[in-house]
Image: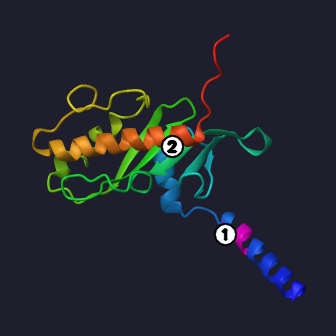
Amino acid sequence: MRFVCLVVLLTLVALSLAVAQTPLDPTMEARLKKVFPDAASFSTKQTMPLPHYIAYTGSGSSRSVAGYVFWTTEIEPLERGYDGPIKMLVGLDVKGLLTGVLVVEHHEPYGSFSVEPPQFASQFKGKSIRDKFKVGEDVDAVSRASITITSAAKVIRNGSRRVANALIAPPAPAK
């Protein structure tokens, strides 16, 4: 009986290692690169403590963590735009600055002039998680899409703050 349990356990460990080392599909890797252009490589999807990908700079022994990439719908699943969730990929560096946003899926009736244009996503690049993300102040508004824009800005802000809180070490206190 112990032998059977040991074989089952070893099989499960081997399968989990094989899955963990499965390379990213080219579409996902291209999306990750779009929101974190300075990264040299990315991890496979991590699940703890929150779902995310790790962005790395360098290679081999000089590889270091540059930041994280996450899906807004996985971090803030209850946030909705006017007509449902807005699925975005967000990059966040280790200093708490956004490296990019990519709108991947939405069902918004005014998407073609609210969250779809590249100007919407590009306005978040370089924003700090400490910024307000308030429509009309530090986020550009679209008059007919205020619910959508407000929701999208809120999910980017809240998701980024949650990821930073879970994965980025706070700065050391000043001496």
Residue 168 versus residue 63: which sits nearer the camera?
A: 168
Please give the label number shown on residue 163. Answer: 2
Please give the label number shown on residue 19. Answer: 1
Residue drawn at the location 79% of the way across and 82% of the way down: 8
Task: Determine the secondary structure under disc 1.
Answer: helix
Q: Position of residue 16 (x, y in %)?
A: 70, 70
Total marks shown come to 2
Q: Is residue 113 magenta?
A: no
Question: Is tag 2's residue or tag 1's residue first in the polypeptide sequence?
Answer: 1
Q: Are marks 2 and 1 in contact (CB under 8 Å)?
A: no
- Colour treatment of the image: rainbow
Q: Is residue 76 left or right of residue 32?
A: left
- Amino acid on which disc 2 is placed: Val
Report how far apart the C-alphas of labels 2 and 1 lie in the structure: 24 Å
Q: Quadrant of the N terminus?
A: bottom right
Residue drawn at the location 28% of the way across and 38% of the way down: 119
Q: Residue 160: name its quadrant.
A: top left
Residue 96 versus residue 118: which sits nearer the camera?
A: 96
Q: Is residue 18 magenta?
A: yes
- Amino acid on which disc 1 is placed: Val
Please state the extent of the stretch shown in magenta in the rendering. Answer: 15-19
Q: Position of residue 27 (x, y in %)?
A: 48, 61
Task: Determine the secondary structure under disc 2.
Answer: helix
